[in-house]
Image (tube, grey):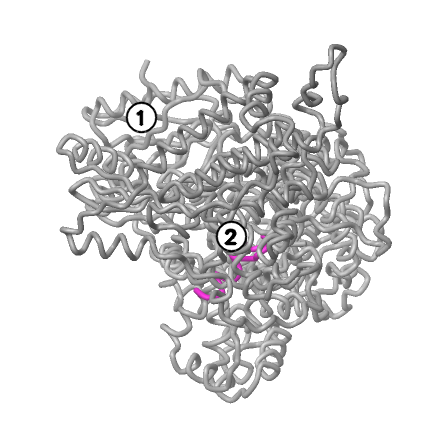
Amino acid sequence: MATISTALRHFKEPTKDQLTQIYFSIPPAPQTIGAPVNPQDEVEKMDINAVLSLGIAGEEDSYAGKLYIMPPYLAFASLDRKSVRFTIPLCTIRRVERLNARAGIYALSLATWHGVKIIVQLTSLRPTADLFCSLLRDALKVELQRGQMKAVKPFVKTCYSEVIAAAGSTGPTENEREDGSLINERESGSDSDAVYHGGLGLKYKFPGDAKKLREASKVKLWTSYLQTHGRNLTLLRYPQCTRLVQVGLPNRLRGEMWETLSGSIYLRFANPGYYEKLLVENAGTVTTSTEEIEKDLHRSLPEYAGYQHEDGINSLRRVLQAYSFKNPELGYCQAMNILAAAILIYMSEEQAFWLLEVLCDRLLPGYYAPSMHGTLLDQRVFESLVQRCLPMIHDHFQEVDVQLSVASLPWFLSLFINSMPMVFAFRIVDCFFCMGPKVLFQVGFKAILKINGEKLLKIQDDGGFLNLMREYFSNLGESAHPDSSDTRARAITRFQELLLVSFREFSVITDEMIQSERRKYRGEIIHSIESFSRRSAVRNLKTLGRFTKEQAGLIYDALYRAMCMAPPPPAAPPPPTLVNSGDGGAERIETRIGLKTFKIFLSEIATWARDEKIVMNGFQQRIDRDVAEHEFIDRLFYFWDTSCRGALSLQDLVLGLDGVMFNDLMENIEWFFNIHDKNKDGFLTKDEVLTLSETFLFIFRFEVGDAYLGAVSRFMTNAFEYGDTLLPERGESGPNGEPLSPQTISPNQPYLNLATFRMVVLADEVLESFYETDLSASFKLELMPDLDLPALPANGLLGDIWSTIATDTNKKMFHAFTDEIGKTIGKHQVIHRPSIGRYTTLEEPKARESLVTPAMRHSTSKSSLRESSSTSPTLGSSSTTTLASAKSTSSTTLLPSDTGNTSTSTSETSLLSTSTSIGSSGGPHSPPPPPASSISPSTSPSVPRIVQVANAALMERTPFAIDDAKDDEDESEDDFDDADEDLDDDDQVMDEVDAFLEAHDSGLTDADRQVAKDLLRAEPVK
């Protein structure tokens, strides 16, 4: 069985609005799962130039940028797109006031749910500012009507930031350890309405030593920031926020900050109770994904204490199963268990579920898809950047045949969680959620190439490369300069050096650069995945019949092309059966096509299943191909559907074609007979004989001359003549001695058996040659032309204009326009290409004599036909009309006799030549891929070997001693005084924060800054 996906062919680059939503981490609309969209609630989007100031004098600088209203969110980004930004749900805005500022200044004061005052100076023209304010007012009214403002209060109670910000906490509470975990499983004296979300770390402790991680100092810094800059739904991200994230998030706040920075908090806020409802509705459901999840549960961070107990395993199971239920097409992929297990240490199940949704769909698209195309694409981009920035290492790796992706692919898939100690990997994950996927490239460059450059030039194989990386990661906690005389230099660890150099020296790696490289190599990756999928699908067929692998590959190509043009429904598991296959395993999901896709597929294989015509109108000459429509194609579809599922798989198509393309004369006659024998009783009724003759007319509709038309006419005459002779006698004479006519039967009664049908066919030379060679030869397996890859977005004004003009719809309109002009001037001509093409002249071959002698005839053929016509007038008239139309059609398909235009006649000759037959066709021999012994069955067979190797390495995580949670009883008696140590920790954390300090341009002049300061003291307009 094979699962064939055409999703890569349907990829579209995100639009400008979508890129803006991705930048601000705004969920796509409608954000409420399953909620209908009310057109009356939709408010227009708008952006406007603005200057942002925090309503606390001296706390932050003012920044110029753009203010966006994207209901139900309000967002801001500074001009450099990195200094300041925020995304605030409109329902968290409690008050909007117009400030009474100096003349020409249009300013608004916004008060958020957490009491943070934001001053926004609109620097556009007055009409534009008025329009923006009007849209903002309308959007706020809609949120008020929806009742979302009432949902804010119970939601923020689930956030731990509310606790530390309200209490001004500078240390752990009575029920908390220093690392943030709880002493007791439940908070002592906690109110049931104030339960905040947390992960497994609350019960099983967080990785690492809290003192070495300086947890208390980090909590102090974050408490101060959250009190003045908002939190959870209303967080304002100033430069200080990014620097604090780079230093590392405190354990207790990490889960909440991850969902806030990634935007998954907005999904959780908009869909309360959805996670629990999803689990309840799918309780007891067993799918392929759930089976694969069970296999990987105990291989997910087994060294962490939480996953050595059923509590942790059950939480992980529920999160992964809920995601597979919500996204059945993606289901489950290896490495998702590693991510889910890691984030569950710091987040509740509901938080982890929505964060996993954002990770797989937006932050790392295609990473955890069956084909893993996103991972493979980023690996190609990574190698390209290495070749560009560090050519010496790239050339050395090429020389010794070392693959970068052997080590880097697990890094990207698991976000370094499986490669380095968790305490350091989570620091990288912090930066990833804050700064985006570019962090993976920056850290990867530094970790592999910059620091270990000299050692990398000495390795000779993949094993040496992996050992070097493993050794480096295991020593990240050691001093980067152990021999330095400077105390501060000796205090810098290798991990701190890694982050500092990554964000400074490789800051040139931007999101725009990565997107550009992805567009550049996407076509190459798609072609590679499709080639591998083709080989895997052919290899997984149960039988090839009489086809070779190359010929089966051509059938796959035709099927894939048809699926791109008419995508089938998503692959689904087979229906349950009472019969057990005996292999002990459930049947795998396979791709099946419906009738619409089958017609396109057959038009690529059979010459009579398509209408090919050469159109000349005096301006151009083109070939149009249309998919034919006829009952015979429908009959063939259901004839090949032996499992009666109403859809065909690749295996069904191979067996169906095998049943006709290699037949001899007698086998083809029987095959044609069986297709039209509807009830499979071995007889054709009169109605079925007429239907069969209409099938002949359909297949021969574009043939030159009257040879085939005459053959069909003689077939009908002989069929009814010989069929009548086999009817039972009614007696020699009537009551008065007159002879009786032959017995009459109903049009739906058995009339013609296979032997009789065979004799009737062999009575005509044209039909005999058709069944002997032409029928099988009409199925042609040919190399398919390459499909167009997803178009790259146009650049510049001319590119935008051309992409707007050069569409398929406009091309069809242009062809129709030129055709009408050609008809007007008398130069429009359409030439249909024959399906068989055996007879190219008007000579009609002579038919053999009738098989029925005069003595055998009970009636003439005319009376037999007349009788059939009288008993079934509808069918009879249909047959006559078909014959007449076929004769008219055949007369219009003659080739033009004039050959005045040399180029035209030459083109027509080449176009009308017969296509390459099956014997001369066949793709190149592709070496079979290695056995996928290390890959999970959940992964699609279209995963290259490098992915399989990486997946095997992914599941083997090296335990690091530094990740062990330290008990409070393990503290040494020689520790320094707590107050002095805390003060020293604060200084060290601030030194590390200052190390990440970057120059941020506010985009304002001194005069603009003075205006912004004056607005802090402005009063609202009365």
Around disc 2, counting alpha carbons within 10 Å, would you say few (fewer than 14), some (14 to 19), or many (20 or more)?
Answer: some
Q: Nearer the viewer, residue 943 or 541?
A: 541
Q: In x, y percent, where is residue 713?
A: 49, 35
Q: Is residue 2 left or right of residue 808?
A: right
Would you name the residue on which mark 2 appears?
Answer: 769
Choose top left, top right, bottom left or bottom right for residue 740.
top right
Indicate which disc, 2 or 1, sits on the residue closer to the N terminus: 2
Would you name the residue on which mark 1 appears?
Answer: 1018
Single out the residue that lies furthest toward the top.
736
The answer to whether residue 378 is magenta is yes
Amino acid on which the number 1 mark rests in the picture: Ala
Q: In x, y percent, where is residue 585?
A: 81, 53
**Tag shown at residue 335:** none
Q: CA distance from mark 2 to mark 1?
A: 96 Å
**Residue 885 shows in the view:** yes
The secondary element bearing badge 1 is classed as loop
The residue at 19%/32% (across/down) is: 823
- Position of the N terminus, as image quadrant, is bottom right
Foreground mark, 2 or 1, reads 2
Q: Which residues, given as a range, are shown in magenta? A: 363-381
- Residue 198 vs 772, above or below: the answer is above
Around disc 1, counting alpha carbons within 10 Å, would you say few (fewer than 14), some (14 to 19), or many (20 or more)?
Answer: some
